[in-house]
Amino acid sequence: MDALTSILTFLQAGAAEGGQSLIMTGVTFGLVILIFYFLIIRPQNKKQKDTEKMLSAIKKGDKVYTIGGLHGTVQSTNEEKATVTLKVDEGSSTTLEFNRSAIAGLVNPPVVKKEKEEKKEKEDKKAPKADAASAEEKK
């Protein structure tokens, strides 16, 4: 009877430890999935959305470069075929037609309005100080 009691006690202790290890394993897997989401999946989705936004905003006259490294100026776009015609030589009328998805980016991307506003604020802050200093010198 003592042997049976000790075996049952041992099995109950093992079952409790097994339950905790199962919970810890689940928590570990959950943390790994969260890390993958925030370090890999989320930034990749954001980059893809930015690229799609940039491609849809391409217009005539934009200077772009392709995934193959070719630089040119957009001469026309075809929404039906999803193609872009690039003028690649300034001297002649050499043009090439590419899929819109072959455009890697803009050569001189437009500056975000927020950055322009920050620059103006910095200049405005500097300007009054200079005006005050020149006013003091005049006195």
Image (cartoon, rainbow, N blue to C red):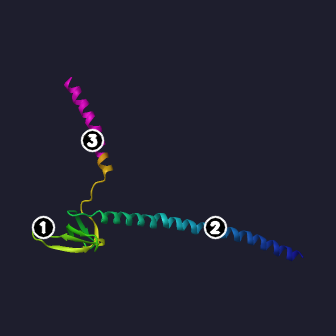
- With 50 as the anchor, is 7 left or right in this view? right
Q: Is residue 1 above or below residue 126?
A: below
Quadrant occupied by the C terminus: top left
Q: Is residue 133 above or below residue 85?
A: above
Q: Which residue is mark 2?
A: 24
- The extreme left residue here reads 91
The Cα–Cα distance between marks 3 and 2, rounded to whole angstroms, is 56 Å
| Mark whose residue sits in front, 1 or 3 | 1
- Secondary structure beneath dot 3 equals helix
- Residue 15, by quadrant, is bottom right
Majority secondary structure of magenta residues: helix
Q: Amino acid at mark 3?
A: Glu
Residue in the foreground of this view, choosing between 106 and 34: 106
Residue corresponding to mark 3: 123
Q: CA distance from mark 1 to mark 3?
A: 38 Å
What's the magenta region?
118-139
State the quadrant of the N terminus. Answer: bottom right
Q: Which of the marked residues, 2 or 1, is nearer the chain's N terminus?
A: 2
Tell me the residue at 20%/70% (across/down). 86
Tell me if residue 12 is in the magenta stretch. Answer: no
Query: Mark 1 near mark 3, Cβ–Cβ under 8 Å?
Result: no
Of the residues under marks 1 and 3, which one precedes in the sequence?
1
Image coordinates for residue 126, horizontal then vertical, percent: 27, 38
Q: Nearer the viewer, residue 54 or 40?
A: 54
